[in-house]
Amino acid sequence: MTSKDNLRYSPYFQEGKHKVDADTSTKSSLHTPAVSQSPVKSPAYSPVKQPANSPVKQPSNSPVKQPANSPVKLPAYSPVKQPANLPVKSTMKNTSPMKSPSKRKKLSDDEKDKRLHSPDKKLGGLTEDYVRKLVLPDHLKENLDIIFCGINPGLVSAYKGHHYCGNNNHFWPLLYDSGLIGQSLTWKDDFKCLDFNIGMTNIVARTTRSAAELSKVEIKAGKDGLMELLKRLKPLVLCFNGKGIYEIFSGVKKCEAGRQCDILDVAVYVMPSTSGLVAQYPRKEDKLKFFIELKQLRDEMKEKINLV
């Protein structure tokens, strides 16, 4: 075996471990086969696993933890100063009663006189002064089942010549819905109520813009006239269309809707006003129960007479 063979099989002839001096390195490079120029593969990325017990380092900008036993220091209290020109708002709820809405502006004497003598569209172009002189006729006869009583005619009723003719008045629909009459009527048919034994009148016959214009003398005379009417016509039931009307008639300061004390053997019933402006009963459905109770009272009085 030659010296070269000995060198090839020598334990030092391994990659990265063989020792060659400067003279032999040049010779051996001539006999050494060329190494292929294949690209060197980089090892696959594997994240370095954090040891389970190794503590996580705290970032440099993280807040310093307060020791458990050390007291927490609160910043000193400094009240917010209120600007001098601004009012201090109270946090307490306002328990004062609500203010009532402002009343209508009172007209001067000149404005009232102008309104009195000026044509009014609501009155068909007639003046208020002219309509005040009109009289709303009663619809009455003897032995009626019910007489509906108002306080006095308003301007629109006097102008149209019919009872309960306001656009927002629920009287006529309720009269039919309750079964008091068997035919649907409107304010134009108010005289036909006599066919169903129902009449209509007022305490005072004078037409006004408001009932507040009536004097005590007029009301006293109207009350006496109504008592005479009851004696003469002898109806079964007298119904006041509005609690305020009955309070004026009876002198009672406050009454509840429903049956009241009889007058001259006539049953007396009080219902809320059928006007749609009544805040407590604004809808027609809210007032239907009073008409139904009135019908029951009428039937009760009829049975009482038949037994006699």
Image: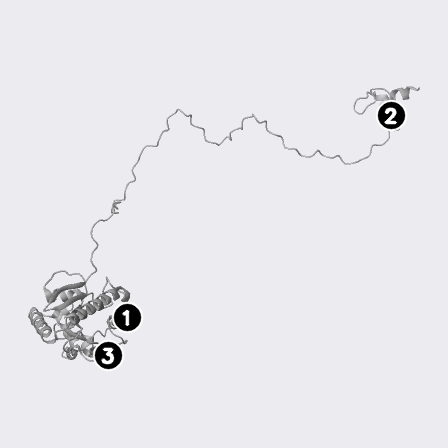
Which of disc 3 and disc 2 is earlier in sequence?
2
> From mark 2 to mark 3, how far is it between C-alphas?
138 Å
The label shown at residue 177 is 1
- Decide: few, some or many residues near mark 1? Use Cα within 10 Å; few <14, some 14-19, many ≥20: some
Residue located 18% across and 71% down the image: 302
| Residue 191 falls in image quadrant | bottom left
At mark 2, the secondary structure is helix
* Left or right for 44, reference 55: right
Q: Residue furthest right?
A: 1
Residue at left offset 10%, top offset 74%: 229
Image coordinates for residue 190, horizontal then vertical, percent: 22, 77
Q: Please name which of the two marks, 1 or 2, marks the residue nearer to the observer.
A: 1
Q: Earlier in the sequence, mark 1 or mark 3?
A: 1
User: How far is mark 1 from mark 2, CA to CA?
Assistant: 128 Å
Say if mark 2 contacts mark 3, CB within 8 Å: no
Q: CA distance from mark 1 to mark 3?
A: 16 Å
Label 1 secondary element? helix
Name the residue beneath numbered marker 2: 28
Residue closer to the observer: 155 or 78: 155
Residue at image mark 3? 189
Disc with the residue nearer the chain's start (1 vs 2): 2
User: Of the residues shown, which amino acid type is indicated by label 1?
Assistant: Asp
Q: Is residue 267 visible?
A: yes
